Image (cartoon, helix red, strand yellow):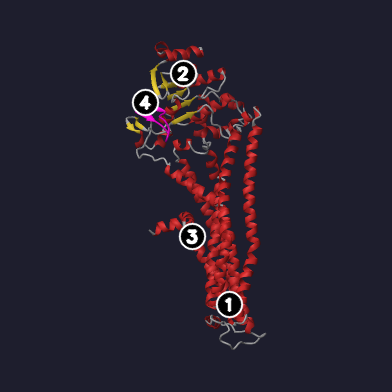
Amino acid sequence: MIKNFIKKYFKHFSYFYSYLRYRIFVALILSIIVGLLDSIGLVFFLPLLSLSSGEVVKNENSFGNFQFLNTWITELGLSFSLGGILLCILILLTFKNIIRFIEGVYSTNSQRDFVVTMRKELVRLFKDYKYAAYTSSNSGKIQATLTTGINSVVAGYQSYTATLQSIIIVIVYLAVACYSNFKFAILVIIGGILTNFIFKFIYSQTKAISKKLTRNSHSFQGLIIQSVAFFKYLKATNTIHNFNNRIEYLIDTGEKYTRQMGMINTFLISIREPIVLTVLFLVIYLQVTYTGEGITSILISVMLFYRALNVLMTLQTSWNSFMQNTGALENMQEFKAELIVNKQHYGKQKFHQFQHSLDLKHVSFKYENGDLILKDINLTIHKNETMAFVGESGSGKTTIVNLIAGLLAPTTGVYKLDDIEIERYDIRQFQNRIGYITQEPIVFDDSLFNNITFWDEPTPENLLRFKNAIEGASIAQFVNELPEKEQTRLGNNGIMVSGGQKQRISIARELYKELDILVMDEATSALDSETEKAIQENIDSLKGKYTIIIVAHRLSTIKNADRIVLMEKGNIKDIGDFETLKNRNPYFNRMVSLQEV
């Protein structure tokens, strides 16, 4: 019950506490000490009003309600004189600033721990994000959340902790002020509460703008990703200007929201001191005029409340800054929850090596709230068999291959790996044995060696594996002709090499690993005929060494496959080798004729 109460009414505190635990309370305790030391330092100004220069004060009521300070001075061996009182104030304020320094260092270290812990948690959760959920997600939102979104949450954390520390200090000041002069304290507290209504409307506006700014940031990040990925097309067709106009519109919109929040912050800072002084002067006037108390009797309370109200205004500014980042914070919490809900769970059974067969039994698949993409699939793929999938676009070819690779799970039916249901395995160990080559080859902006070895150390053993991989992919000569050989940087998405070379680099990367299964999804469809033929010869040379699964539009690339699966509207219509299908299946025969294979 208490836990639910905290989550409901202190949800932001609960979120930060989940990362920092006891460290939040340590920072708050340090704030209490700072507030107490500062308050007591101010109380020491009371006897200064009664002291004549260099004279010892005989009045035991010099500290008003804080007579225990007389005992402290005596026990410290200090004289009750101007010099003694000033020395006490100096000691207290020096110690206060030492504690404040410790508090600052501790808060900085806690903030860094918070950032590191949060970044690592999100990266780990994203690593286990289900592929099916990823396909329907917003890539701009993902990138923005993992990069700038984290920075906004950190800024929110800074504002939130500053708010908590301000609350603590205000409470300490108010407590000491109440102890000093209760009636005056009550009047100022009422005045402070009334000022809070000024800020309520501002907070709601800031929170609404924050949400708009977060959504704008997601859209902006998405367009930036696409402008980089599709730069060649946009440039060649001159559509980059229209695309750029949309980006500039989002930049202007984001700037408008940022400017609005900046104006709100500036307004809050500008009205802080006038509000503080207005409340104080009004209460002083009422206290002196209607209660008959002298100004001296309430001086310490005035000083404490001036400090308290200044901190209160700082608190309100900090809270407004926090409101500016609540959109990012709520988005981060939603994103984390989405990653957790869609976290892939792994079986406990170890997988070492593919032994004999992959079996799909009455398997169907659909995405959530979608139509069936695969319908009652029954298929067995044998070890070291080369199997190809063909059919019109949307027939389910890529989906069935993604399912075989463990990226997707059957909606109904059973998928068995070596006679054991695949859910029982740790699917990651199976995927370690899979090579995957797509139509758009994956090339990282790094050296050729790191692209193929995935940043392995260049040990003698790894260098030998690298050499065997580039020879198996028929790019050894190409590598040796590069200016820096295997250390040559390939540029963004492999811009420094041709399409055929990128595909061979992709093949070499998979051959570098210890594979059982090689998946090629439209791997040669974007290449010219000569390059396609050369790569096809590479693939044919691997036949019988690996289980090869090919998705193809060009039938010339699968003539040598052991079996070809003809797909149509999510169903398997026929299975056989090239010649068998050509002779017995009219649809396949028509495909062969149209492509002049």
Q: Is residue 303 above or below residue 500?
A: below
Q: Please say whether residue 149 is one of the residues in the magenta stretch.
A: no
Residue type indicated by callout 4? Ile
In 3D space, how far apart are the residues under numbered discs 3 and 1 (Cα atoms)? 31 Å
Q: Is residue 271 above or below residue 59?
A: above
Residue at numbered disc 1: 43
The numbered mark, 2 or 1, whose residue comes first in the sequence reads 1
Q: Secondary structure at mark 2?
A: helix
Q: What residue range appears in magenta?
A: 357-375
Q: Secondary structure at mark 3?
A: helix
Q: Which mark is residue 558?
A: 2
Viewer-side label of 4, 2: 4
Residue type indicated by callout 2? Ile
Residue at numbered disc 3: 23
Indicate left or right for 275 with 421 as reference.
Answer: right
Residue at numbered disc 4: 377
Viewer-side label of 3, 1: 1
Viewer-side label of 2, 1: 1
Image quarter of residue 132: top left
> Residue 549: image x %, image y %?
43, 24
The numbered mark, 3 or 1, whose residue comes first in the sequence reads 3
